[in-house]
Image: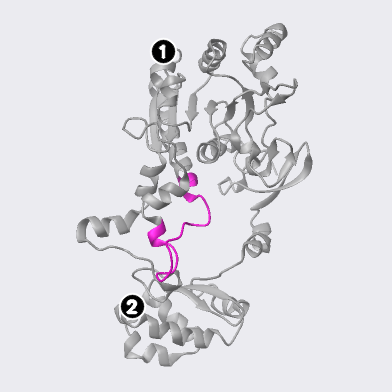
Amino acid sequence: MSELALPLTGFRVISAEQYGAGPYGTMFLAQLGAEVIKIEPPRRGGQDGEATGGGDTARAVGPHFLRADESLYFQAFNLNKKSLTLDLNLPEGQEVLHRLVKTSHGAVNNLRGDLPARLGLDYAALGAINPAIVCAHLSAYGRDNARAKWPGYDYLMQAEAGYMALTGDPAGEPQRMGLSMVDFITGTIMATGFLAALVDAQRTGKGRDVDTDLLSAAVHQLSYPALWYLNEGTETRRNPRSAHPDATPSQMVRAADGWLFVMCQLPKFWDKLTQRIERPDLAADSRFATNADRLTHRDALTALLDAHFGQEPVAYWVELLAGHVPVAPVNEFAQALDNPWLETIGMRCEINHPDNPEMKGLANPLKLDGQRLPNRAAPLLGADNDTILGTLGYSGNDIARLRAGGVV
């Protein structure tokens, strides 16, 4: 297989980032070929003379580590990047930043909303150095309102944006989603805005600020239920079996050994379902004649489907329905990742890390010319300091001085 030509090759992006949302978005840029330079706080000397702390806080997120300050969690968000330790609070750190900006196309951060201006990471500060620089900001609540100084995390957004009210059994407590999906979608939105502004900057020579925030992204994902409520006053609520609010059966059904999800979003799929499972009586039942009828009698239909599907295991039903009716097994976590289909489509891979040459990972979901994007292990803290500083004109003595002064 020929080496894949990556579309962002030659673009340099600085990112003052931490934890999940921002790093998730910039990882896409790095996997698409951009040189993403991750700016991280340097280690500090402890009382016993040992260096302590430093780096993206994600490096210390357990429970699994490749070495003391290199977590598997960190690997999930920082593949293909470079690491430069730099204290942006020091004048010498700002001098390094400004040299770097002159040769960069973008500067990204996911800091608290009041910090980019204070640390000189916005276009007002960096545009004077490089007019074409694109400054992308991802914060909890935005940079231009009374919540700018508020810290915030994914789970809070799920609570405030109504996700928890939509998730779980209606008879139980509100539930958050099992993954930090607000972080991931906000990182993706940030990357989309950044790329659009980058295209414009390449065309016009002028960059700009691009902003998104966790709460805005979370609210935007309310999507069509939001329009139903805003225009018709219809308040979507959670349904038993994680059922779709309007189509049925589009929900979990119980098989002999577990659960599967069946989705009859269109009338033709209801017809095919009754044919494939050999239940013409359901097709002929006036209670289930139309989608509206099935919604009205959803509890009765659920009981009948459970009784029928309960006669055989999940695998039997998936094989019977696959390709005819939209269906999937409701997998346990291990089943989902051990699914051989992931190997077939290339979504599981090995990544060579200095501490584990066969580290298991996930491929990027994008393909270019039919090929998955290449993966390189996330960088060790400060691994690229000397190389990057050297390209900026710093000599070995200069770098030693910066290191001794705690700048890098």
Look at the image and say whether residue 184 sits in the magenta stretch. yes
Q: What residue type is labelled 2?
A: Leu
Q: Give the range drawn in magenta.
A: 164-185
Could you tell me which secondary element the residue under label 1 belongs to? loop
Give the main secondary structure of the magenta stretch. loop
Q: Which residue position is annotated with label 2?
A: 295
Residue located at (43% from left, 64% from top)? 173
Look at the image and say whether residue 114 sits in the magenta stretch. no
Residue located at (54% from left, 16% from top)? 97
Mark-to-mark CA distance, 2 and 1: 60 Å
Residue 136 quadrant: top left
Residue 230: give x, y in percent of width and height. Answer: 23, 55
Residue 231 versus residue 78 in the image, above or below: below
Q: Which amino acid does label 1 sit on?
A: Ala
Viewer-proximal residue among 104 and 331:
331
Specify few, some or many for label 1: CA neighbours under 10 Å numbering under 14, 14-19, or 20 or more. few
Does the image show residue 405? yes
Label pair 2/1, CB-CB below 8 angstroms? no
Residue 313 versus residue 352 in the image, above or below: below
Residue located at (45% from left, 12% from top)? 129
Specify few, some or many for label 2: CA neighbours under 10 Å numbering under 14, 14-19, or 20 or more. some
Residue 206: give x, y in percent of width and height. Answer: 38, 20
Residue 116 quadrant: top left
Q: Find residue 128 and name its label.
A: 1
Residue 42 versus residue 139 in the image, above or below: above
